[in-house]
Amino acid sequence: MYNVLAMEKKTSFFQRVKDKIENFLPMKAGSFILFLFVLYLIFIVIRVVALNYDSNKDIEAEAEKVNQLREENKYLSYQINYYQTYSYKEKEAREKLGYKAPGENVISLPVDAPEDKTADSGIKPAEVRTPNFDLWVDYFFKK
């Protein structure tokens, strides 16, 4: 008998809690739990989509790096091929070692100094004029 009364008290306590929740919420407790579960699933889907988007951006960035490295590799292989040609070797020998081809005359010219170079145009550079305000200051305050 004591167990039956205790069960009724527990049931009535849980019933009262359930009634209070149902009064507070516009839906039944089971519907609310289902609603929370659906919200949780939506949250999980959004998180997975965001992670997928970020990983796709990372994949695109890495693919771009791979393309850049391929282009750089191609450029370097062209340079290696050029450096192995006879024309490059001849050019470097002429510039660095002073070699000349048979029957060729080499003329040595002096290097131009920067002050020797002048502008080719006949236009004179404009004179920088002193602003009127500075002239008045000089007139009144400097002797």
Image: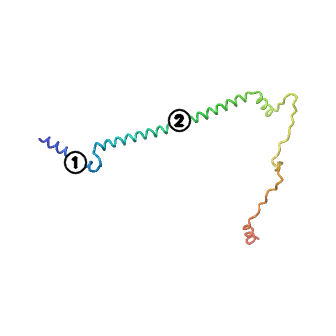
Q: Position of residue 75 (x, y in %)?
A: 67, 32
Find residue 62 and report its image quarter. Answer: top right
Query: Which of 111 and 135 lies nearest the eye of the viewer?
Result: 135
Residue 57 vs residue 68: left or right? left
Q: Position of residue 113 (x, y in %)?
A: 82, 46
Find residue 31 and report its image quarter. Answer: top left
Query: Which of 52 and 83 lies nearest the eye of the viewer?
Result: 52
Q: Quadrant of the N terminus?
A: top left
**Number of numbered tags placed on the structure image:** 2
Mark 1 burial class by Cα count in 10 Å: few <14, some 14-19, many 20+:
few
Find residue 129 and report its image quarter. Answer: bottom right
Please name the amino acid that badge 1 sits on.
Arg
| Disc assigned to residue 121 | none
Q: Rounded to the nearest whole Å, what is the CA distance between mark 2 and mark 1?
A: 56 Å
Q: Quadrant of the C terminus?
A: bottom right
Q: Earlier in the sequence, mark 2 or mark 1?
A: 1
Residue extending furthest toward the bottom = 140
What residue is shown with label 1?
Answer: 16
| Disc assigned to residue 59 | 2
Residue at the image point whose x is 79% and y is 33% from the top: 96
Residue extending furthest toward the left = 1
Mark 2 burial class by Cα count in 10 Å: few <14, some 14-19, many 20+:
few
Residue at the image point whose x is 39% and y is 41% from the top: 42
Q: Secondary structure at mark 2?
A: helix
Above or below for 125 versus 58: below
Residue at the image point whose x is 14% and y is 41% from the top: 4
Residue at the image point whose x is 12% and y is 42% from the top: 2
Please name the amino acid that badge 2 sits on.
Ile
Q: Position of residue 140 (x, y in %)?
A: 74, 72
